[in-house]
Image (cartoon, rainbow, N blue to C red):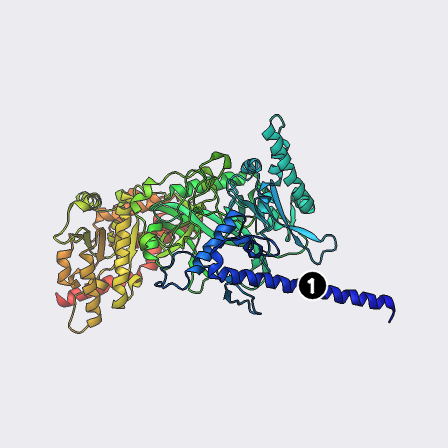
Amino acid sequence: MSDSSREQETRAEQLDHLQELKKLRKRERRLRAYILARSPSASSSSSEDDDFKPTTNGVNYILYNGKDKTGAQAKHAENDTKVDDAGEHEAFDPGMKSGLKHLYSGKEDKKGRFQWQEIIPEDIGDPVENDETAKWALLVRNVKVYNDPTRVLSIHSIVVQSPLLKKLLASVLKNYPGVTVGLNRLEFTDKFEPLIHRWTELQEAIGKLGDETEDQCTTKSHAKLLQEVLTKEFKSLIETAQDMRSKRVMTYQHLWTLFQPGSTVFARQDGQETAMTLVQTRYGQDAKGVPCFWLNCKYVDWDGAKFGIQRINLSISAYTGTRSISSLQVYPLEYHHEGESIRTRLIERGAKAEALAGPNYRAYQGVAWRQGSFGTRDKYNVKGRIVIDTHGWNRFNPTSPIFVAPLNQKELAHRSGGRGASYNNEEDDYGREEDEDYGENLDDDYDEDDGMPINGAFAYEEDTAKHVPLTTEQKLICSPLLRGYSLKNKLWLNFFVNCVKDIEWQTDAFDRLVLPKNQKELILGFTESQRKFRDTFDDIIEGKGKGMIILLCGPPGVGKTLTSESVAEEMKVPLYMMSAGDLGFDPRKVETKLQDILEMCSRWNAVLLLDEADVFLEQRSLHELERNKLVSIFLRVLEYYEGTMFLTTNRVQTFDPAFQSRIHISLDYPGLSIDSRKTVWKNFLDMSSQEHTISTTQLMQLARMDLNGRQIKNILKIARLLASRKEEALSHEHIITTMDVTQHLHNETQFSERTKGNIYS
């Protein structure tokens, strides 16, 4: 071994010895300080004791709650410790000794566990942020970068401390979710989304700064510092994102630069054009584990009593390369190819949805849907009358109700828990900054709302007329869905606003009803009066006996069913036609279904028609116990019905006697007279646009035939088809030919009746 090698080895050993010696001395000093602090004589102060004060990393001070306490403060803290230790041997009850005791975490094991100790750890360093760093306008934290040969450091976070710069950022970041610029500590981290999304606004604001006053010059200087830091770090990202947006394309990796929280986004939901307000975004995975970009959005919806906020999560699946922005599943509304016209359409639809808030009786033609048993959507093609009633939806569909968070009417603002800015603040997140310079405008909807009503109760429907009108922006993001009941399908369904139409009323339906005039006036008068004044009369028991039950009895085809239909059309109210299939025959379910139907009809002021009522109201017997249960249920439930009900039957003699006292009006429909049949023939002929050559004499001949109204309608329907087939006007011959071919069943029935009459006469 050469002399130089030996010399180097000797020097290395000496350095190691020196390091070990320093460590030993350091431990000795700490031990002496600890013994001195524990000694009862430590309360006496001397110049010699000052040489043995506790030190940390060679600095003569004490760390106290994360801040350095030097001089008098350190002496005070040390004296507190000495006083505490001096009275250590005194007797105290648990928790009664005045003062505090500091404990420190010891070394951690492999699992991150540690033990508490009384000695300050040796590896504690000095706090980096202190009164000295608080003087700077900006604090920029940097971290090491790995696997990137172009740089070794990147910005971890930026703390804005300049009050002048905060004032500038207040206008730039106004209404940006999750950013409260007026706080003492404003920190940006992660991808710096607020500054990147508002980069253009920041550049413009800096460009407008003047230098007339000292504050303006200082503000400009601080703003330039922030601009230089961001430009150096994100220049490539900003230029790439702006270039792709100008060409209306975007990569999957840069999607977050396209979506600014608080902006309006466009998507198609169930084939409907919808606009929503973006709350926040993140990269993640869908239910199948496929990478996707999640967007949490909110829109305006109606819960039966008020408008409010609903949330929805949308996603964009991962893709390679660039893709046209307008081809994405969700994209900012400003990139829609139709521009302002789409905004106009959505605002008009929102205004229509607002007008349909509350119970409404309308026509519908289109597709409707409801949630299936396994999460699927069962679709129905609906063409007919519907009742729009979200409050009723909540009442009769408690497993899938509609609840909304409160809506701020002043401005649809945006609060999200944004990722791009964090801050230290002990104040309430829902608080509103009073200083207008900070430009905070937070909405009042609660992000943590779990969709349940307050105190578990439904909202009061009486508040419907009191709601504040929606703003233009709220109409823009209003839901395209309405909840209601299809009278034809007998189902609660989700309807689309654009498919709702006004009802084309048949104003002459009641006039065409072939009944004696006084009988028609009686029926219409009773039903209208009952609807208007049902709350003025009550039974001894509240809610009992408020309804009106009308029995229509007579042979088939004399207008019993048509009477109830005409009354509903004349009063412009819904007609609910209840049959045996709607209730079933299981007594355990019949009562619940019947009560729901009666409650719905009462809510809507609807006319309830129980056609062929003898199926349910037939007289009880000793041998049919199941039927007796059904009849008993009807007897009890009808007592508490508050609406108008029509019962039709041609077997009134089989009714149970208990129903007689529950029926308010009973009308007998005799067979049609010659004059009545003539009127029926004339009404059906006049209703058709097809020409006919039937004279008054021929009409009288037809009226003399013993037919009911339904038979007349069927004969004319077939005769018109026959005339159309021959491309001729409807004539008497067409009608006679039809009768000869189709009325054999009617003739056989009449022959049987005459035969029976001869036998028993």
- Residue in the picture at 41% in, 51% down: 383
Q: Position of residue 146 (x, y in %)?
A: 69, 58
In this rendering, the answer to whether 28 lies above or below 259 is: below
Instruction: Tell me the quarter of the image containing the N terminus.
Output: bottom right
Q: Nearer the viewer, residue 284 or 760?
A: 284
Q: Position of residue 604 (x, y in %)?
A: 29, 49
Instruction: Tell me the quarter of the image containing the C terminus.
Output: bottom left
In this rendering, the answer to whether 131 lies above or below 718 is: above
The reply, left or right, for residue 677 in relation to residue 40 is left
Residue 247 seen in render:
no
Q: Nearer the viewer, residue 13 or 327?
A: 13
Type of the residue with mark 1: Gln
- Residue in the picture at 31% in, 61% down: 582
In this rendering, the answer to whether 343 lies above or below 84 is: above
The reply, left or right, for residue 203 in relation to residue 481 is right
Q: Which residue position holds label 1?
A: 19
Q: Position of residue 407 (x, y in %)?
A: 41, 44
SS for tag 1? helix
Q: Residues within 10 Å of mark 1 (few under 14, many from 20)?
A: few
